[in-house]
Image: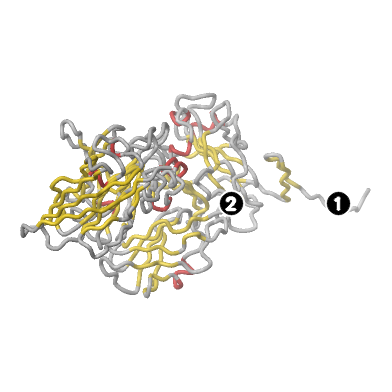
Amino acid sequence: MKNVIFTCIAFSIIFINGRFSEHSDITPGVSASSGEAEPGDVIISEIMADPSPAVYLPEREYIEITSLSDFILSLEGWYLLAGNSKYYFPSVQIAPDEYIILCHVSDTQRFSGFGRTAGFRSFPALNDDGKLLVIFDKTGRMIHGVDYSPNWYGDELKSGGGWSLEMIDISSPFNYNGNWKASVSPTGGTPGRINSVMASNPDNEFEGIINVFPSDSVSVKVTFSEPVRILESLSGNIKADDFSVTSLSAADPLRREFILELNGYLGKNTVYSLSLPPGVTDYAGNMPLKRTFDFGRCDKPLPGEITFNELLFNPLPGDADYIEIVNVSGKIVDASGISVSSKDPATGKVSAPVAVSDVHRCILPGGYYAFTSDRSAIISRYFSSRPDRIFTVGRMPSMPDDEGILLLFNLSLECLDEVYYNESQHNAFIKGKEGIAIEKINPNALSSFTGNWHSASEASGWGTPGKENSILSDAKTSGKPVSLSSTRISPDNDGFEDILVIRFNPEGEGNVTNVTIYDETGLPVKKVAVNFFLGSGGELFWDGTADDGSLMPQGLYVVFVTLLNDRGRSQSWKMGCALLRK
């Protein structure tokens, strides 16, 4: 046929990961994107940080990226931040749902059989012990990133090498906790294809603020549990009591930390409360559960101001030890300035101090602070715990199961507190002692006084890390020189009246006491205190046991107390108490 005009339209049909992507008039090297990439459009979905010993993959490091965008995106000018170094992408495009294997240019042939590759002339070393990896577009906007850790494997054998880390639910790319695990592919990883661990793991919760610490008298650093999408535009509505924010800037590439400049000066040892306005969300759109946080400028702790309060030294198999300390002063104290050591009871040798925090954190007056090498296990095991007051440390001091000595130090290596623990400090009513913490009955009493320690109650789940102790003395001062917390004691470890508290409120400063428990026949069964120096007052405790540690039978008992003051005056009291058994 002559003089007939035909119109030809060229289509590029791409079949990627189970779906067709159709783009008309695609010219090689030209982007078909309808706009700039948004955060989460291109994500890091797999990391091979330790390829040795190889399973069935090339013995080379790689990073896999995936596109969640509906458009073809050009990665020209984009860069990967690894640690503090930038590595620019080659001039490539990525289509919707496409996977690209990032590796050194010399390794592209090795990975070409697994999927599409993009070779970097300089490729970052992926540390076995973790690294910050962040993708930025050509404008410097953060698109996605991870701060991976060997703990993410969830498998001690696979963390030894040859297995990749895979994201579980790529639709929740900024959900880090529990959204990564070791590959279950027989080859050791799935570069260039759908992850072997793929499953639904929606990001439905945003913990919010996890730390606020003053950088100086006019600025604070705010840390979030996840990257925050919008904060700069809301900075004018962020408050710290009567202070407002004059400027705000991101302090880390993943937008989890921000520096806030205030319009006034923060006073030392004054507690302030920072509050977020509505509109602050994570990248999944979740609002923060914790939108206020108390903080303040810190002061140096002195001996006796930060003390041991709870110890788990004989955990259940597979669990970890934990230590809880408490601030009994009126100061605000920086946790990073506190360290703990162990001391051999036989030789007196003291181990090298271990910092209780690798970041600055405020311990407020009366505040509890627990630390362990396995935070998730402790939170899972002890339902009465306060997760926001439990923190992970790289290593713990030596804590033998039978007995040990622990010491707390400040930055000047002044000893803040010392405690000797022994399994005999547990309630004699308890047979199996694994997994049961010992708690201070009175946080203000001396840690060195073994009678001030007791097993955590069964009702509390055998431990209360990060919160008020289950066997806390709540005896009120009666105004009398000597008084009892109750006229009965039921030492069954249910958390109610397990301990008899003997409260002293004498005159003067140099008081010494002797306390003995007598049974109904008048026989002495327990010497609670012998020439014990009280000073101006304090508390002693009876747990219903005899001198040999055995449990006393149900019945009536007499608490006989003598007081001798520094003027030579002696007084004595006899008080009745019923010991009850279920």
User: What residue did someone put label 1 on?
Assistant: 6
* Chain-order first, disc 1 or disc 2: 1
Instruction: Kindly tell me whether residue 395 is visible in this rendering.
Output: no
Residue bearing mark 2: 41
State whether residue 171 is above or below residue 350: below
Q: Element at badge 1? A: loop
Q: Is residue 529 visible?
A: yes
Q: Amino acid at mark 2?
A: Asp
Residue at 13% x, 52% y: name it: 512
Q: In the current view of this chain or complex, which residue is farthest to the right?
A: 1
Q: Report how far apart the C-alphas of labels 1 and 2 lie in the structure.
A: 39 Å
Q: Left or right: 497 with respect to 143?
A: left
Query: Which residue shows up at 31% across the image and 56% down it?
Result: 485
Look at label 1 and name its amino acid. Phe
Q: Residue at x 25, y 63 (%)?
A: 330
Q: Position of residue 271 (x, y in %)?
A: 32, 66
Q: Classify mark 2: helix, strand or loop.
A: loop
Q: Position of residue 266 (x, y in %)?
A: 29, 69
- For the residue carrying disc 1, how many other residues have a C-alpha within 10 Å: few (<14), some (14-19), or many (20+)? few
Where is residue 94? Give x, y as percent: 61, 46
**Label 2 packing within 10 angstroms: few (<14), some (14-19), many (20+):** some
Q: In the depicted view, which residue is nearer to us: 253 or 117?
A: 253
The numbered mark at residue 290 is none
Q: Tell me if residue 552 comes above or below residue 279 in the rendering.
A: above
